[in-house]
Amino acid sequence: MNEVLRSIEKRSSTRGYTDEKLTKEELKQLILAGLQAPTAANKQEIHITVVEGNNPILGEIEDVKNKERGIENPPHNFYYEAPVVLMLSADESFYWSPLDAGIAVENIALAAQSMGLGSLIIGCIKDAMRGEKKAHFAEALQLPAGYEFQIAIALGHKGTEKEPHEYSWEKNVTCL
């Protein structure tokens, strides 16, 4: 089995990280994996904001998410204390931006797996990021004008292991 297929097979969401920071080279490789993803009409509209896990803006986003969902005292924040979170934003007027961001974040997740790192794709903050504080979060994260949050990914060295999810060929595949 080739390395890409092995990474796809073995990847699972990481919900626990060590305190070890990513190196600049590791972070650069992960960002490049996202930027090298295909986009509709080759628009290449994905913008990546790198946020250290201890940045106060993540706490603000967490607070809004919890308030909107009626959650009190969660055991973990939305990024499970990962040392870095990549926030992907894109042109809010481009129809394909959500799909393009999904492709980019999957590239990043698979690159992380191939490098022995953990990742967690994050969509649970979408309402918070696009709600009443949308402009505040966009400014704090330095999103380009006309761009909005699409999806995020937490990254770091795995502190926990989890088996990949099960699937059913019979249930999930139709061959005509």
Image: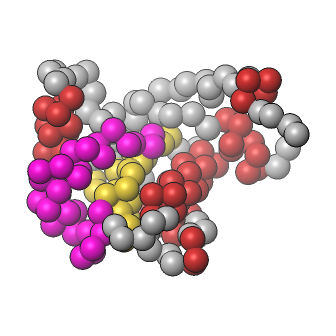
Residue 83 lies left or right of residue 155; in this view the side is: left
Quadrant in which the N terminus is drawn: top right
Looking at the image, which residue sits at the far front? 176
The x, y position of residue 93, in whole percent, is 36, 71
The x, y position of residue 149, in whole percent, is 31, 58
Residue 142 vs 111, above or below: the answer is: below
Q: Does any portion of residue 49 appear in the rendered image?
A: no
Q: Which residues are magenta?
A: 120-148
Residue 64 vs 104, above or below: the answer is: above
Q: Is residue 122 magenta?
A: yes
Residue 70 vs 120, above or below: the answer is: above
* 52 and 128: which is toward the camera: 128
Rendered residue at 29%/63% (across/down) = 148
Looking at the image, which residue sits at the far right? 176
* 1 and 17: which is toward the camera: 1
Rendered residue at 62%/26% (across/down) = 165
Rendered residue at 56%/70% (across/down) = 39
For the image shown, how many numbered marks are present on the structure? 0
The x, y position of residue 77, in whole percent, is 26, 33
* 155 and 148: which is toward the camera: 148
The colour scheme applied to this rendered structure is secondary structure
Name which quarter of the figure residue 143 lies in. Answer: bottom left
Quadrant in which the C terminus is drawn: top right
Q: Does any portion of residue 105 appear in the rendered image?
A: yes
The x, y position of residue 61, in whole percent, is 19, 45
Q: Is residue 159 magenta?
A: no
Rendered residue at 61%/38% (across/down) = 11
Residue 169 lies left or right of residue 99; in this view the side is: right
Residue 46 lies left or right of residue 106; in this view the side is: left
Name which quarter of the figure residue 87 lies in. Answer: bottom left
